[in-house]
Image (tube, rainbow, N blue to C red):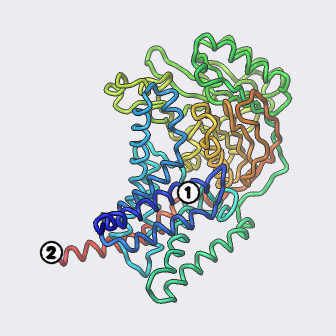
Amino acid sequence: MPAVVSKLHAVFPHLLLILAGGLTTLAFAPYTLWWLPLVTLALLVFLLQRANTAKQATLLGFSFGLGWFGVGISWVHISIDQFGGLPLAGSLGLMALLVAYLAIFPALASWLNHKLRLPVVMPLVFAASWTLAEWLRSVVLTGFPWLSLGYSQTSAGLKDFAPLIGETGISFLLVFAAAALAQICRPQAAISRYSYLLIAGAVFAISPFLNQVKGWQYSDDSLSVLLVQGNIKQELRWAPEQEWPTMVKYMDLTRPHFDTDLVIWPEAAIPKMEPLAQDYLDNLNRAALYEDTAVISGILDYNVKSREAWNNLIVLGKRNADSTDGDYFYGHANRYSKHQLLPIGEFVPFENWLRNLAPIFDLPMSSFTRGGFVQPNLVANGYHILPAICFEIAFPAQIAANMTPDTQILLTVSNDGWFGDSIGPHQHLQIAQMRAIEFGRPLIRATNNGITATVDASGIISARAAQFSETVLKDTLRLTHGNTLYSRAGDYPLWLLCSLILLPLLLQRTYRHYVARK
C-alpha cells in the first residue's frame, strides 16, 4: 500500500497539469475565458518551483503541453480521420505524435527555467523562457504557432497592448503575470512575493488606457465589400465533375451583388487549374470591369514544363479606380502565391519516402511550390491589400514584412472545411482578429464554409456569415491611417528584453561550470 500511495503521489501533479492544460483551451474562441491562463499557468509554475531536478521540471511542462494541445487542437483529428484514409488507431496515433511534438515546447521552457532558476527574478525568467520556446514552435519544421497564449486576450484583458507589442508581447506579459501569481505561495520575503504581483496587476490596470496611443486613426474613407461563401463539401472540392457546378455557383452568388468596391472569393474557390480556366476567368474579368469593381479569388496555378504548382490569389476586373480595361491576363503580376505551406496538406516532408506510406501523405493538391516571403500587395480597384492564405495569418512576422506605407486592408482567405463543426475555425478567426489589432488595419476573411467575416481595425467583428451556409456577406469597413508601434518594430524589443533576462544567467551558469571543472 505505501508503494501505491507513493506512485499516486508522484503521478498526481502530472495528471493535474494535463487537466490544467486542457482547461486552458477554454481561454480561446469560442469560449474566450481570457483570465483562465493566469490560473492554469500559475499552477504549472507553482509545481515547477517544487521540482528538484531538471528532468522533473521538463516532465511537468510536458504534461501541461499534452493537455493544452491534446484538447486545443483536437479539431485536427477530424481532417486526419475523415480525409487521411487511416484506420482509427492510425489516425489517433498520428494525432498523439503531433500533440507530443507540440508538448516538447512547454517542456523546453520548463527545463530552461529550472536550469536558470533564480527565485528573486523567477517570473521574468519563466516568461523569457516561455517566449523563447514559443518562438521555436513558430519556426521549427515551418512552424505551428497555433494557440499561442496571447490570442486569449483578443477581446479583453491585455488586448490594448497588441498595437504596441503584438500577440507575442502579450504572451510574455500573461506568462509573467501567472508566474507572479504563483509567487504568493513561495516561502520568501513578502516584498519579493508581492512586488511582482503588484507589477502584474498594474499591467492589467493600464491596458484599457493604451487605446489612446494605438498609433492609428480612422480616415474619412470607407470600403464596401462582398464576401462569397460557396459552402462546397470538402469531399467534392476536387472532384472533376464538380468543377463547372462550383464555378457557376460562385458566379451566380456574385452576379446580383456586384455593386461593391471589392468582391472576395475564398481560397481555391475556382477549382479548375488557372491555365485551363481562361475562358471562365476572361468572362469574370470583363464582368467585374463592366460592374466597376474588382474580384479577388483563390485559384491553383500549374506550370506543365517545370511541374510546379502554386496556391494563388489573383485580381480580376479593375486594378485602379480609373482603369478602363480589365486587370487580368494569365501570368499577370497582380497576384499572390502562398508562402507558408502546411506540412502534409500542401507539401510532404521526405516526399519520396512518405507518399506511398499512407493516403494521408498523398492528399489531392499536396505538393505546392512556396511563394516569396515578401511579395507586393495586391491592388484591386485602387485599394492596396496585404493577403494571407489560410494559416499564414498566424505568422505576424510575415504580415509585418509585407506591410507597406500604402497597405489599407488585410485579407485572409481559407478553406476550413477540413475541420467540420469544431473549435478550429473559431480559433482561426480569433487569430485573424489579433492581426487587425496589431497592425491597425481592417481585415477581410473569406472562407469556403465559414467563418466568413469582416473585422474592424480595433479587432471587433463587424459582420459574419453563418457557418455551413451558401451565402454572401456585404459590409462597409472604415479605413485607417497611421502605423502601430508593432508594425514598425515587430518583436525586436521583446527579443532584446528576453536576451537581457536570459543571457546574464546563461553566462553566470557557464562560468560556474567552468570554475567547478577547474
Q: Is residue 362 above or below residue 79?
A: above
Q: Quadrant of the C terminus?
A: bottom left
In which quadrant of the rendered view does residue 226 lie? top right
Using the numbered discs, state the Cα–Cα distance from disc 1 to disc 2 in whole angstroms: 45 Å
Q: In front: 423, or 482? A: 423
* Location of residue 402 with respect to 84 vertically, above or below: below
243 sits left or right of 474 in the view = left
Closer-to-camera residue (468/161): 468
Q: Position of residue 467 (x, y in %)?
A: 71, 35
372 or 143, nearer to the observer: 143
Q: Residues within 10 Å of mark 2 (few under 14, many from 20)?
A: few
User: For residue 105, which quarter of the picture?
Assistant: bottom left
Mark 2, secondary structure of its residue: helix
The N terminus sits in image quarter: bottom left
Q: Is residue 367 left or right of residue 273?
A: left
Q: Is residue 500 visible?
A: no
